[in-house]
């Protein structure tokens, strides 16, 4: 491990809302990182449980900020405003990092110098952190067109817990969109990053993504696709150079993914409704 003088400061931002049950695991995994030059910021989004007490029990190793309940995007943005590091890494408060995560990413960033965002593979685990399966990182390089080609897919795999991002890059693309709520908000943020920066990944599975009753993986399918529809509309509004053909193709691809899911689950009326939506005006 090199000296702290040679290693850039990494600001770790943890948004939290009523996840006291999992918060200790998350914070301990960050404090056990082999990379030492960390600034750890927890933003509590108006929790009604013991989350703040748990976070404050770690003492001055963690900066705790409390706000009224405004949603995860507002919490992340408040963390960014208070961050002073050259790099920013997010971690949802129910997820867990492996000890070498940040060190591997910083070393990669320093050796390459051309990637503004570096993410990793993940281990999908149950509520007790038992392995369900691994999921590999997939996309690298100029990923801007991948968002158009794969509108129902997380191009930056679990980016809100896997990614290490240059602070300079965040300042260029802007913060998380606080008008968006629920599925699609991360897709929108990482899409904007991909439009101006190259992306790469560490192939190792460095984040434990915990599946539980209220995790993002349990979001109802229709809400997931509604979030992606909103994110896709955002992309079309902000990118006038995307042709009408490419917009329509991406719109149909998103809905076709949903239609297949509904057909597989024998929800035929829902599948027909999505077919109508796929062929209707995009409405941006």
Image (cartoon, grey):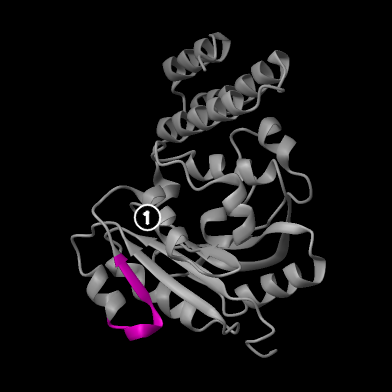
Q: Quadrant of residue 100?
A: bottom right
Taking the image as shown, residue 214 lies to the left or right of residue 204, namely left
Q: Which residues are magenta?
A: 57-65
Q: Quadrant of residue 117?
A: bottom right
Taking the image as shown, residue 103 lies to the left or right of residue 282, namely right
Residue 209, horizontal then vertical, whole percent: 50, 61
Residue at 40% x, 83% y is: 61
Circle 1 Cα neighbour tier, 10 Å, few/some/many (<14 / 14–19 / ≥20): many
Q: Nearer the viewer, residue 259 or 150?
A: 150
Residue 271, horizontal then vertical, whole percent: 49, 18
Q: Nearer the viewer, residue 19 or 261?
A: 19
* Above/below status of 107 relative to 18: below
Q: How many marks?
A: 1
> Can residue 95 be seen at all in this image of the molecule?
no
> Can residue 179 be seen at all in this image of the molecule?
yes
Residue 77, horizontal then vertical, whole percent: 43, 53
Taking the image as shown, residue 276 lies to the left or right of residue 106, namely left
Residue 280, horizontal then vertical, whole percent: 53, 9
Please tell me whether mark 1 sits on a helix, a strand or a loop.
helix
Q: Which residue is mark 1?
A: 75
Residue at 40% x, 64% y is: 93
């Amino acid at each position: 491990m090199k000296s702290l003088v040679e290693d850039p400061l990494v600001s770790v931002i943890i948004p939290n809302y009523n996840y006291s049950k999992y918060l200790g695991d998350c914070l301990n995994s960050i404090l056990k990182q082999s990379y030492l030059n960390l600034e750890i910021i927890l933003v509590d989004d108006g929790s009604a449980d013991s989350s703040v007490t748990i976070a404050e029990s770690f003492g001055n190793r963690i900066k705790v900020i409390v706000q009224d309940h405004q949603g995860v995007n507002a919490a992340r943005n408040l963390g960014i405003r208070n961050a002073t590091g050259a790099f920013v890494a997010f971690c949802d408060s129910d997820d867990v990092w492996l000890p070498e995560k940040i060190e591997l990413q910083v070393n990669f960033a320093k050796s390459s110098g051309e990637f503004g965002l570096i993410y990793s593979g993940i281990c999908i685990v149950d509520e007790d952190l038992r392995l369900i399966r691994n999921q590999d990182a997939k996309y690298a390089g100029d990923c801007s067109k991948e968002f158009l080609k794969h509108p129902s897919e997380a191009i930056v795999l679990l980016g809100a817990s896997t990614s290490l991002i240059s602070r300079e890059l965040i300042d260029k693309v802007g913060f998380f969109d606080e008008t968006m709520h629920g599925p699609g908000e991360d897709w929108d943020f990482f899409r904007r990053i991909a439009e101006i920066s190259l992306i790469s990944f560490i192939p190792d599975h460095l984040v434990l993504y915990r599946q539980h009753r209220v995790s993002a993986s349990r979001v109802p399918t229709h809400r997931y696709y509604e979030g992606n529809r909103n994110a896709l509309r955002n992309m079309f509004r902000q990118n006038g150079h995307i042709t009408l053909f490419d917009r329509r193709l991406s719109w149909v691809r998103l809905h076709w993914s949903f239609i297949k899911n509904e057909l597989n689950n024998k929800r035929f009326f829902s599948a027909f409704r999505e077919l109508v939506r796929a062929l209707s005006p995009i409405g941006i």
